[in-house]
Image (cartoon, rainbow, N blue to C red):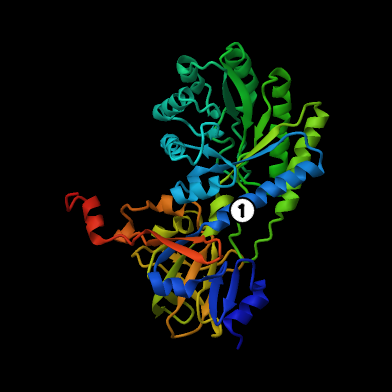
Amino acid sequence: MQSYQEFLDLSVGFPQDGFEIIDDELYFHDLNLMEMIETYGTPLRFTYLPIISKKIQQAKILFQTAILKHNYRGSYKYCYCTKSSHFRHVVEEALKNDIHLETSSAFDMPMIDALEKKGIVNKGITVICNGFKTYQYKQYIIDMLHDGYRNIIPVLDNKEEFNIYDDEVELEEPCNLGIRIAAEEQPDSPFYTSRLGIRLEDILDFYNNKVAPNPNFKVKLLHFFINSGISDTPYYWNELEKYVTLYCKFKKINPDLDTLDIGGGMPFKDSLVHDFDYEYMVNEIVNRIKQICAVNEVMEPDIITEFGKYTVAEASGILYKVIGRKQQNDREKWLMLDGSFITNLPDVWALNQKYVLLPINNWDSEYERVNLGGITCDGQDYYSQESHINSVFMPKTRKLQYLGFFHTGAYQEVLSGYGGIHHCLLPSPKHVLVRRNRDETFNFEVFGEEQNSKQVLRLLGYQQA
């Protein structure tokens, strides 16, 4: 019978970029994962920070190349969507690459102010402020505008939001605003229109009646997010054409408008059969925007993207140990892990999200079909199929087995509540940050130790702080 390594190679082609096998063990971007496990134990979350910069640079090169290829007259600006991961090590790594930020809630703003006080950013950084804004969020925006952050752009999510800026913003130069279009949902959605943004048919009237007469404000940016993410589908291209056409109409009555924010949604590699053509999609987006503007006799806009998952997902993984094997019937074999999908990878449970799953060791062993069980007592805490097949295969062995889920860096820590209370009181796993030294050796830093019982009891009120 084939070994697991032979089986995987015949199934999907292996090794692949970022993964290789050395002496029967898996390496991730040259990281010796078994060595990490032996040093730090499991379950273990790790983040390899250089991947973040690599992904940003790839996207910037793709857009700049497309702009040159199509003689596109606008510029490109990369904004990182902070809600994908707010952690300082992630944001600071991203900011090494001459990028800007997109925010979605109130506490983003003091976070940016803290970065400025440390000298990581300056007050000229572009900050796209999205979301339905609480009073506190709007007040933070106003305070930072008055404090000299001249490129903060509040993106109006509803017409009423403008009123507080109109009442309280007092600047020497007009304040730049954005407007978010309420996009149409996908055909299979239970809703017709996104809850976020202003109705497409209301935007021009709102601008003419409320913003245009006010010399203290300029609408500089039009924003939309197509809910399928960036995808080569009729739905995506139809929606893109609709919103770029609106930009052209808007530009003709508002000369200050010069920027189109096409949102996020660039996919990340969540499967070993991932074959998304990034170069084609970026070229097509730039070209279609240019062509629509040419038909409408409008200068092409500057383009902003807000990539979050794309920026951070592929930098992280979580490693588990198999702590038990159970044969529940003739067909179903379970490998029980020393962690949980619900608490460590909540998108697996909530959205049926798939990640790159690979064994860490025993690649020379035969393979078998298994189900993976989390350690909580919840019937939904399992992983039973990959994105490309309705099964999970692992090495068939009685030896100690480790496995890893990779490209898990977006949303999972925040959704699971880092440092908080988790289902069945499972502790937050240890988290290790990995950097690359100038001599190409690795630098390891324990960002967070595994949560202990005293911390949990204190949060539950059993012990005093």
Where, by quadrant of the figure, is residue 438 drawn? bottom right
Visible residue check, residue 292: yes
**Percent from the top left, x then y, of residue 435?**
50, 60
In the foreground, 24 or 225: 24
> Label 1's element?
helix
**Percent from the top left, x then y, of residue 309?**
55, 50
Q: Is residue 253 left or right of residue 263?
A: right
In the foreground, 449 or 191: 449
Q: Is residue 14 above or below residue 430?
A: below
**Percent from the top left, x then y, of residue 303?**
68, 36
Q: Is residue 6 left or right of residue 322?
A: right
**Residue displayed at 58% across by 77% down:** 21
Q: How many marks?
A: 1
Furthest-bottom residue in this view: 1
**Residue displayed at 59% across by 27% down:** 179
**Percent from the top left, x then y, of residue 16?**
64, 69
In the foreground, 85 or 424: 85
Q: Is residue 119 above or below residue 417?
A: above
Furthest-top residue in this view: 213
Disc 1 marks a residue whose amino acid type is Lys
Q: Is residue 91 above or below residue 133?
A: below
Q: Which residue is mark 1?
A: 55
Q: Residues within 10 Å of mark 1 (few under 14, many from 20)?
A: some
Q: Is residue 47 above or below residue 166?
A: below
Furthest-front residue in this view: 439
Visible residue check, residue 371: no
Quadrant housing the N terminus = bottom right
Q: Is residue 263 left or right of residue 232?
A: left
